[in-house]
Image (cartoon, grey):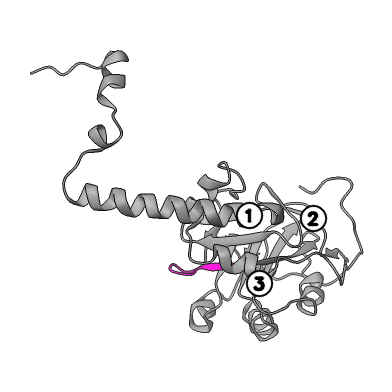
Amino acid sequence: MQSAETEIGVVHTKARRASHAQVDGLKGFGVATVHEVIGRRGLMEPYMRPVFRGGQACGNAVTVLLQPGDNWMMHVVAELIQEGDIVVAGITSDCPGGYFGDLLATSFKACGAKALIIDSGVRDTAQYEAMGFPVWSKYVCAQGTVKDTIGSVNVPVMCAGQMVRPGDIVLADDDGVVVVPNEMAESAAKGARAREDSETDKRAKFAAGKLGLDMYSMRDGLTAAGLKYVD
């Protein structure tokens, strides 16, 4: 659900944008890694699933607010897409439907979009993988939509439990979708690199047979907690 203060009927043509450097700094990191380093925040609800496995996306959020059962604003947001953007769609009230299909996917891709994140339904899903256009959605639904009621573009929207603002950075992979506030982009990139380097070292130790019990010095804590080994 969107807040009562959400703007309706507004298209911001000059909204804040993440820089190319901010986006590039986060590309290649997994959603789980970034979610951890920004304080375990920003993760969309686990019902947001990729339409096909193996897709990855990292880009500047361009937001669109849709009305229930109405995809009119999807055609409006297409005009505001820039190369590398990710379109993030929130709905004013939950309503399953196929707000997005292969024709809109073709349009979005031609405009430069790298992915769609939508807190509702999409259809024509067989075509997305062939097109190389990843989509994360709450539903897959063949039901059509109408074009009767206006929403907004480039306003803050609630999408799957997270507030997304124009210019925030969105990452998505098989694990889900995470939103990085614009002002945290640089620190998130540094933290993700440090965490990934640490995990590379730990992975090598696990592969060599070392146990997490010893690597993380867990034995004393387990004993203090009352754990007993019985032959």
Q: Is residue 226 visible?
A: yes
Q: Which residue is mark 1?
A: 179
Tell me which numbered mark, 3 or 1, is placed earlier along the sequence: 3
Q: Amino acid at mark 3?
A: His
Q: Position of residue 11 (x, y in %)?
A: 88, 68
Q: Position of residue 166 (x, y in %)?
A: 76, 61
78 falls in the magenta region: no
Tell me which numbered mark, 2 or 1, is placed earlier along the sequence: 2
Please rate how many residues cluster around mark 1, counting C-alpha atoms within 10 Å: few if below 14, some from 14 to 19, many from 20: many
User: Would residue 54 be found to the left or right of residue 22 on screen?
Assistant: left
Q: Are marks 2 and 3 in contact (CB under 8 Å)?
A: no
Q: Which residues are magenta?
A: 52-58
Above or below residue 25? Residue 107 is below
Quarter-wise, where is residue 147 in the image?
Answer: bottom right
Please tell me whether mark 3 or mark 1 is closer to you in this view: 3
Please tell me whether mark 2 or mark 3 is closer to you in this view: 3
Residue extending farthest to the right is 9
Above or below residue 111? Residue 186 is above
Q: Which residue is mark 2?
A: 156
Q: Main secondary structure of the magenta part?
A: loop
Q: Residue at x 91, y 64 (%)?
A: 10
Q: Residue at x 29, y 27 (%)?
A: 218
Which numbered marker is on residue 145?
none
Q: Quadrant of the C terminus?
A: top left
Looking at the rendered structure, the secondary structure element under dot 1 is strand
Which numbered marker is on residue 20?
3
Tell me which numbered mark, 2 or 3, is placed earlier along the sequence: 3
56 falls in the magenta region: yes
